Image (cartoon, rainbow, N blue to C red):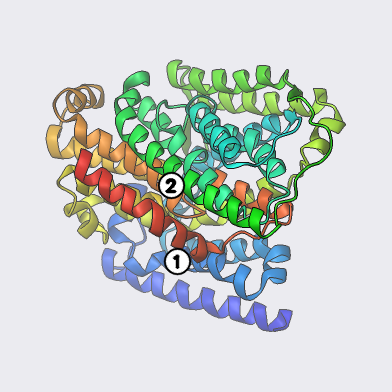
Amino acid sequence: MGKRSILILIGFLLLIAVLMFASETDVAQGGNHGNGHDNLGTLLPLWSVFPFVGILLSIALFPLVAPQFWHHHFGKVSAFWATVFAVPFIFAYGSPALYEIFHIYLIDYIPFIILLWALFTVAGGILIEGTLKGKPIVNLLMLVIGTAIASWIGTTGASMLLIRPVLRANAGRSSKMHIVIFFIFLVSNIGGSLTPLGDPPLFLGFLHSVPFFWTFNIFAEMAFVVFLLLAIFFLIDTILYKKDQKAGLVQEDTTDTKPIRIRGLFNIVFLLGIIGGVLMSGLVKLGHVTVLGVHLEIQNILRDLILVGMGLLSIKTTAKSIREGNEFTWFPIKEVAYLFAGIFMCIVPALAMLKAGSHGHLAFIIEGVKKPWHYFWVTGFLSSFLDNAPTYLTFLNTALGNFYAGLPEKESVARLIAENSIYLKAISTGAVFMGANTYIGNAPNFMVRSIAEETGLRMPSFFGYMIWSAGILIPIFILVTFVFF
């Protein structure tokens, strides 16, 4: 298809979307455009999530049917779907639509990417050298370490710190795709369950009056899932390792073993700076400024500046040989930045409808959530495909509204923890655990996959990965439901 044909197709899709949005707006408002951003969730039609479905299908299918095209043009595909939604959305709803777009980029996307970039950059400056042989017990130990530290340096920090050593340790093995998949399950997701530093939804809860150490209350749920996953991994890895050994597919390193050493360890200081910046933004109140109609907390702006500073200091002070030893490139973070820029745009209608509660076109989801296991599964399912931070907040507010409507947030959260903590546990575990269900459930998933593929490892497709998660994670989550919720 030529460029002219593509432009005609884009124009045709935009025209259809503009006409449909305009028609819905006229019906809903008697011909008047949106009169405030608060009611957009009640006005947006259900089909407005079509671009979001489109970008998900593109991420799932293009790497399968047109891998070369996808590798060179994934940013353009992301921009295409963002444009298909944004242009008619703005045309139909005017300034409220612009506000929603500015809001999600200024409040959510830009801080999200800054945090990921900072952790990616700093962790990429720490090189673990020495002889690590990818035997089952060694792989198990590395997964345990990664899972243990993820709650303290974030799932992104832990993933970026350990994925390259894991890949190097298993470079001589034939069967190793499963190792990266379990790495995503444990280090990139479930390991971040114990503190607000571990995963964005928990940090959002911290900002909304959930005590910092309350998340240790879900240690039992996390330990249950981690134990089962580690046991399954060790069994699978042992079977495949022995099978490869018998077939002569394990390339044993015959050179002298080299002691383990860590270079670039001073980057830990920058990592602590990132953690300090994140904590500061949750503990300090410095007022706010308004940018493009959006209220930005000054402490959050300061946090982002600190994170950028830590990343730049790491680049400046880390020897080039260390990053070369890590086979460090900027491609993984660029892929996440481009794709999530489109995803964040396209999830605007879905999040707006969820926030509208019983008045939006996704009311059937909100109204169907009553029991703890409902919260666990609905929060988890949506977190597998939407941004898990606003999904967490949506269902936290749903629970607060069901039990303590009309009370101030701080008081209602305290009472929820004291009287109905099982609901907060269900929301928290659903948002964090089920981010492992898909590649887009949590940003580190994408980066780990990208880094693995840069080494030549063939990773499963979007749907192929979901077969793994459905076959391993879903049965475990069903057990979690019966045991805990």
Residue holding disc 1 = 53
Q: Tell me which amino acid carries mark 2.
A: Ile
Image quadrant of residue 175?
bottom right
Residue 232 circle label? 2
Compared with 15, 336 (above or below) is above
Residue 294: image x %, image y %? Answer: 47, 38
Q: Are marks 1 and 2 in contact (CB under 8 Å)?
A: no
* Residue 399 point in image, percent of width and height: 20, 39
- Nearest to the observer: residue 365 or residue 81: 365
What secondary structure is found at the residue carrying circle 2?
helix
- Disc 1 secondary structure class: helix
Q: Residue at x 15, y 31 (%)?
A: 406
Which mark is in front, 1 or 2? 2
- For residue 423, say whether it is visible: yes
Upstream in sequence: badge 1 or badge 2:
1
Q: Quadrant of the C terminus?
A: top left
Viewer-nearest residue: 20 or 200? 200
What is the C-alpha distance between the residues marked 1 and 2?
33 Å
Q: Quadrant of the N terminus?
A: bottom right
Crowding near the residue tagged with mark 2, few <14, some 14–19, many ≥20 C-alpha atoms within 10 Å: some
Q: Position of residue 322 (x, y in %)?
A: 81, 31
Q: Residue at x 38, y 26 (%)?
A: 207
Instruction: Indicate the position of residue 484 as horizontal and vertical percent values.
Output: 22, 38
Identify the amino acid type marked 1.
Val
